[in-house]
């Protein structure tokens, strides 16, 4: 298995799908490569495309505050996306793009091997759990995953759209993450 740095170098010049034609930067991921906690979102947005960093816009600020709310900093966790290049006009990545990019996120997860993997929103949850069940049913419930635990939570953009109720739900989901990191959890099999 190539190193995480080699994988990053590979991704930064990847042209395996048409998103390479419209991206400004490849957004590989950032944070602690030995993190116990890893987040996986959907795809970069406009700010992420401009900076090459994941979750740096409005959703990113909300994600940061939720991480800090359970006593951690962004430097202590690892953050990435299923797809590394921004889909034009923030459309959903199409199946061929997801398929082309899937080996990169799979390899990232293998390298970082977090104790707790958190999927942010429907897209990442359905892909990694290979399920058609929606995020509103799955959110906050730990699932056994590759020797660790996967917890689906609402995407920060969805939290923001739902206002105060979304924040209550998000804080409840992040409490499940905090408890999972302490090891005090029971998981369901996927
Ligand atoms: S989205 Fe993924 S597969 Fe497509 S060009 Fe970017 S890094 Fe390569």
Image (cartoon, grey):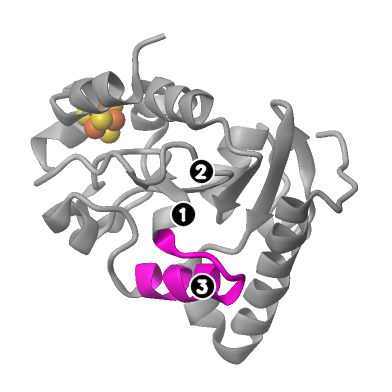
Q: Quadrant of residue 98?
A: top left
Q: Which residue is mark 1?
A: 76
Q: Is residue 46 left or right of residue 182?
A: left
Real-space Cα separation, disc 1 to disc 3, in angstroms: 10 Å
Real-space Cα separation, disc 1 to disc 2, in angstroms: 6 Å
Sooner in the amino-acid sequence: mark 1 or mark 2 = 2
Q: What SS does tag 3 mark?
A: helix
Decide which of 32, 109 is in the foreground and name it. Answer: 32
| Residue 22 pos. (x, y %) | 11, 42
Q: Which mark is residue 68?
A: 3
Real-space Cα separation, disc 2 to disc 3, in angstroms: 15 Å
Dots 1, 3 in contact, CB < 8 A: no
Q: Is residue 174 left or right of residue 186?
A: left
Q: Residue at x 78, y 42 (%)?
A: 143
Is 180 inside the magenta-drawn segment? Answer: no
Q: Is residue 136 above or below residue 172?
A: above
């Amino acid at each position: 298995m190539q190193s995480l740095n080699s994988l990053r170098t590979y991704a930064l010049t990847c042209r395996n799908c048409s998103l390479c034609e419209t991206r400004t930067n490849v957004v590989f991921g950032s944070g602690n490569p030995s993190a116990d906690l890893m987040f996986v979102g959907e795809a970069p947005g406009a700010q992420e495309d401009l900076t090459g960093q994941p979750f740096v816009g409005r959703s990113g600020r909300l994600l940061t505050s939720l991480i800090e709310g359970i006593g951690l900093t962004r430097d202590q966790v690892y953050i990435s996306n299923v797809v590394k290049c921004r889909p034009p006009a923030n459309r959903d990545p199409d199946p061929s793009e997801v398929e082309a990019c899937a080996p990169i996120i799979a390899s990232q997860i293998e390298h970082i091997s977090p104790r707790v993997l958190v999927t942010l929103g429907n897209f990442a949850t359905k892909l990694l759990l290979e399920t058609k069940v929606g995020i509103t049913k799955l959110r906050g419930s730990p699932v056994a995953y590759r020797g660790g635990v996967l917890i689906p939570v609402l995407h920060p953009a969805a939290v923001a759209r739902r206002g105060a109720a979304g924040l209550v739900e998000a804080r409840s989901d992040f409490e499940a993450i905090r408890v999972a990191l302490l090891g005090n959890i029971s998981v369901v099999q996927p």
